[in-house]
Image: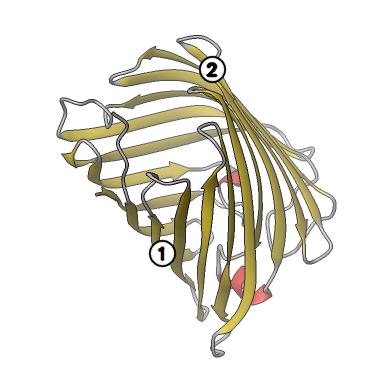
């Protein structure tokens, strides 16, 4: 029988980069049971950014919406909310944010998703204070075309409030040697391009990157209580006409599975690719992920 759950996901994240940015982030996601065609969804996050030798700024986002399953293969989703910020010691200033999404499943491991979202840049103090926003349009495609091989593609275009435009292309080809636990090897490639260079955020006119990755994850193994996942990747990046640079990425999660559907995990991520942050910095993140279903 198909199981139906209400899902709650509280997360705590700490971020440090080599640009002197320090972030504390709390986020909370909620989805009502998918037993019925109409689901309630909600999101809240509070981000506090501190820049060395500068004042701090905070930003919070909250939205609520619904997801409607037209049938077992197609759903539509819409959200509305507010993004608020304290800039340079001011009081909270709020703006509306919107989102929409449609996803179609051709089969269990073959789907396509279209989405739209308004965002305010909040990576660091300078970006929160700038009040720069974007309208983001995304097409995602996932296909496990055999039992072992699959592809994932992301095409994103952003219209930014400072009259800039960016285009992002991401392509991943992977091979699953085992499913439980998951042992996966693959290649990721990406390209990022902006129409104009901004003095506030990382905005190359031609960024290219590629990496080879290995992933091991036993979180979904039905017999495991103590679970972990490890991803390692090496590759290169090329920013505009500069020489290619080597990049590395490490992601580690470990924790306890309370039952088959709920867990608490500590995580640590390191990424020295310029595209890892909106500001183009080497980034380290760590914290607690949790998933509760009932």
Residue toward you, 113 or 244: 113
From the viewer's perspective, tell me whether residue 14 is left or right of residue 291: right
* Element assignment for label 2: strand
Q: List x then y, in percent, for residue 74.
A: 58, 36
User: Residue 224: x, y in percent?
Assistant: 16, 28
Say which label, 1 or 2, has the lower sequence index.
1
Q: Is residue 62 above or below residue 115?
A: below
Q: Tell me the tag on residue 170.
A: none
Q: Is residue 6 left or right of residue 74?
A: left
What is the number of callouts on the image?
A: 2
Give the residue drawn at x 32%, y 41%: 4
In this view, the residue in front, 100 or 127, is 100
Q: Position of residue 203 (x, y in %)?
A: 73, 52
x, y percentage for residue 196? 84, 55
Residue appearing at x 62%, y 43% in the figure: 102
Residue at mark 2? 150
Tell me which corner region of the image, top left, top right, bottom left or bottom right, holds residue 236.
top right
Q: Which residue is mark 1?
A: 25
Give the residue at x 50% y 77%: 53
Check disc 1: other Cα within 10 Å, few if <14, some if 14-19, many if 20+.
Answer: some
Quadrant in the picture for the N terminus? top left
Question: Would residue 161 be found to the left or right of residue 2 on screen?
Answer: right
Closest to the observer: 147 or 182?
A: 147
Instruction: Look at discs 1 and 2 and give the one toward the viewer.
Output: 2
Tell me if I can see residue 46 in this picture: yes
């Amino acid at each position: 029988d198909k199981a139906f759950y209400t899902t709650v996901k509280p997360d705590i994240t700490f971020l440090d980069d080599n640009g002197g940015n320090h972030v504390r982030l709390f986020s909370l996601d909620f989805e009502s049971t998918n037993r019925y065609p109409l689901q309630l969804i909600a999101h809240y996050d509070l981000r506090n950014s501190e820049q060395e030798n500068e004042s701090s700024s905070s930003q919070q986002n909250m939205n609520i919406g619904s997801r409607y399953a037209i049938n077992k293969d197609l759903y539509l989703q819409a959200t509305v909310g507010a993004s608020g910020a304290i800039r340079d010691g001011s009081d909270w200033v709020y703006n509306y944010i919107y989102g929409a999404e449609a996803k179609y499943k051709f089969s269990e491991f073959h789907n396509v998703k279209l989405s739209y979202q308004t965002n305010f840049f909040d990576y660091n103090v300078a970006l929160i204070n700038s009040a720069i926003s974007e309208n983001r349009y995304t097409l995602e495609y996932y296909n496990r075309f055999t039992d072992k091989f699959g592809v994932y593609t992301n095409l994103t275009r952003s219209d930014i409030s400072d009259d800039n435009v960016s285009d992002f292309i991401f392509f991943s080809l992977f091979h699953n040697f085992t499913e439980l636990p998951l042992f996966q090897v693959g290649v990721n490639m990406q390209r990022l391009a902006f129409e104009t260079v901004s003095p506030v955020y990382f905005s190359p006119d031609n960024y290219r990157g590629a990496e080879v990755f290995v992933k091991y994850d036993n979180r979904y193994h039905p017999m495991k209580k103590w679970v972990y996942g490890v991803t390692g990747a090496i590759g290169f990046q090329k920013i505009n006409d500069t020489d290619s640079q080597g990049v590395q990425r490490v992601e580690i999660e470990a924790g306890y599975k309370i039952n088959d559907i709920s867990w608490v995990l500590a995580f640590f991520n390191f990424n020295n690719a310029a595209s890892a942050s909106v500001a183009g910095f080497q980034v380290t993140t760590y914290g607690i992920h949790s998933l509760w279903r009932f």
